Image: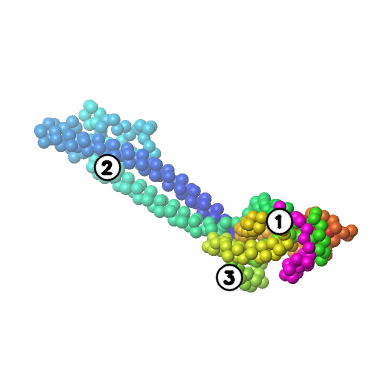
């Protein structure tokens, strides 16, 4: 990864340097061409006049034969001559110029004119060569850039994570804060509740904590987006990538494996869009689990809000695929416990205490961790005890 970053930095530096040189040469070439065209026009006019005088039998204004006469206004020592024009000026130094008559006319030989024109052609060829080189470097940088799009900053990740948490919390307080009878809970949803808390019936009958149970249920459904690599791109893509990831994780060092994940996720999300079918499917599952448990709510608005949450989750999981972030609804990496473990102030924020012991009864929201040499906590889980 460091070598790729160094290569990118070198390429960018080289491109910037050559682009600067190219722009400078192009400007000098443009200025020199403008000056040269002016002088060439003056020379051609002078030659035409001399030829006309010769045909008419009028003695030329210079005793030099076979030369090209230059206007005395052409001062080779003028400080206002452009840098590029100095290249031509060097060909026309005092030793190569001869004074004419008393009117100060300067004569340039045809051979010197041809040398000046050749130097201008050489300069034009150099500009064209630099242009091609800049274009090649730009193309190379374009190829490298997509694979070097790295992770969110910690601040960006935390901001987007908290935004999703707030979205779920707002929905639960608006639609899912009323108690309901345990008898209306389907067997499937009952199993989900039991996995969340052994005392789930307490939440269904206690108004102050009912929304906590629903929030935990929503997160339980959403969690697969963060657990399965590239899940947002659909089952087929994520299954293939997961198989390869499982194999590589045993053959690469942790650093190499994490770098591979980031580069791979960057390319996959560049090529494959978010799977809307999966969003619709998960939204349907949430609606089926929640709607039978709520009454007197705007079902259309609730369904729309749930779909917005699933969509936001898919988008955020796609961004998290390109990071070293870990989302856990357990008490730590490697654990499968969702409740029944000691409360940890380092990992958790306590939202309600229903029992006398400091043992977690319900994880309302997951923990957001960052995996470096060790795990660091970016956002604590919300729990009840």
The residue wearing badge 2 is 112
Q: Secondary structure at mark 3?
A: helix
Report the Cα–Cα distance between label 1 and label 3. 39 Å
Which span is picked out in magenta?
A: 174-196
Q: Is residue 317 magenta?
A: no
Q: Earlier in the sequence, mark 2 or mark 3?
A: 2
**Comparing marks 1 and 3, which lies closer to the viewer?**
1
* Residue at x-position 35% and y-position 48%: 124
* Residue at x-position 76% and y-position 56%: 178
Report the Cα–Cα distance between label 2 and label 1. 97 Å
Q: Position of residue 207 (x, y in %)?
A: 80, 55
- Left or right, 179 with respect to 314, comes to right
Image quadrant of residue 198?
A: bottom right
Report the Cα–Cα distance between label 2 and label 3. 73 Å
The residue wearing badge 1 is 296
Using a 10 Å C-alpha cutoff, classify the residue at mark 1 as few (fewer than 14 neighbours), some (14 to 19) or many (20 or more). few
The residue wearing badge 3 is 236
Using a 10 Å C-alpha cutoff, classify the residue at mark 3 as few (fewer than 14 neighbours), some (14 to 19) or many (20 or more). few
């Amino acid at each position: 990864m460091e070598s790729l970053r160094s290569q990118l930095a070198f390429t960018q530096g080289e491109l910037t340097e050559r682009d600067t040189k190219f722009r400078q040469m192009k400007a000098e070439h443009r200025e020199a061409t403008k000056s040269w065209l002016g002088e060439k026009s003056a020379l051609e006019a002078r030659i035409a006049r001399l030829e006309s005088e010769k045909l008419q039998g009028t003695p030329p204004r210079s005793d030099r034969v076979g030369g090209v006469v230059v206007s005395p206004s052409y001062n080779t020592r003028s400080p206002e001559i452009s840098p590029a024009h100095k290249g031509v000026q060097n060909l026309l130094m005092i030793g190569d110029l001869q004074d004419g008559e008393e009117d100060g006319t300067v004569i340039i030989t045809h051979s010197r004119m041809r040398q000046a024109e050749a130097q201008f052609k050489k300069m034009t060829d150099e500009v064209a060569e630099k242009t091609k080189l800049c274009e090649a470097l730009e193309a190379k940088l374009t190829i490298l850039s997509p694979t070097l799009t790295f992770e969110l900053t910690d601040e960006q990740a935390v901001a987007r994570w908290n935004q999703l948490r707030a979205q779920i919390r707002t929905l639960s307080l608006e639609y899912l804060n009323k108690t309901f009878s345990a008898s209306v809970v389907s067997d499937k949803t009952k199993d989900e509740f039991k996995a969340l808390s052994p005392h789930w019936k307490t939440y269904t009958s206690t108004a102050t904590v009912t929304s906590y149970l629903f929030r935990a249920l929503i997160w339980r459904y959403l969690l697969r987006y963060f657990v399965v690599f590239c899940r947002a791109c659909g089952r087929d893509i994520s299954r293939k990538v997961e198989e390869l990831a499982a194999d590589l994780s045993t053959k690469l060092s942790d650093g190499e494996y994490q770098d591979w994940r980031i580069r791979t996720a960057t390319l996959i999300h560049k090529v494959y869009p978010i799977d809307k079918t999966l969003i619709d499917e998960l939204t349907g599952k949430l609606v089926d689990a929640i709607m039978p448990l709520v009454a007197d709510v705007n079902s259309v608005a609730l369904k729309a809000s749930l779909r917005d949450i699933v969509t936001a989750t898919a988008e955020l999981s796609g961004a998290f695929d390109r990071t070293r972030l870990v989302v856990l609804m357990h008490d730590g990496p490697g654990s499968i416990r969702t409740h029944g473990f000691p409360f940890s102030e380092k990992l958790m924020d306590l939202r309600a205490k229903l029992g006398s012991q400091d043992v977690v009864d319900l994880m309302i929201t997951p923990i957001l961790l960052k995996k470096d040499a060790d795990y660091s906590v970016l956002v604590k889980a919300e729990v009840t005890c």
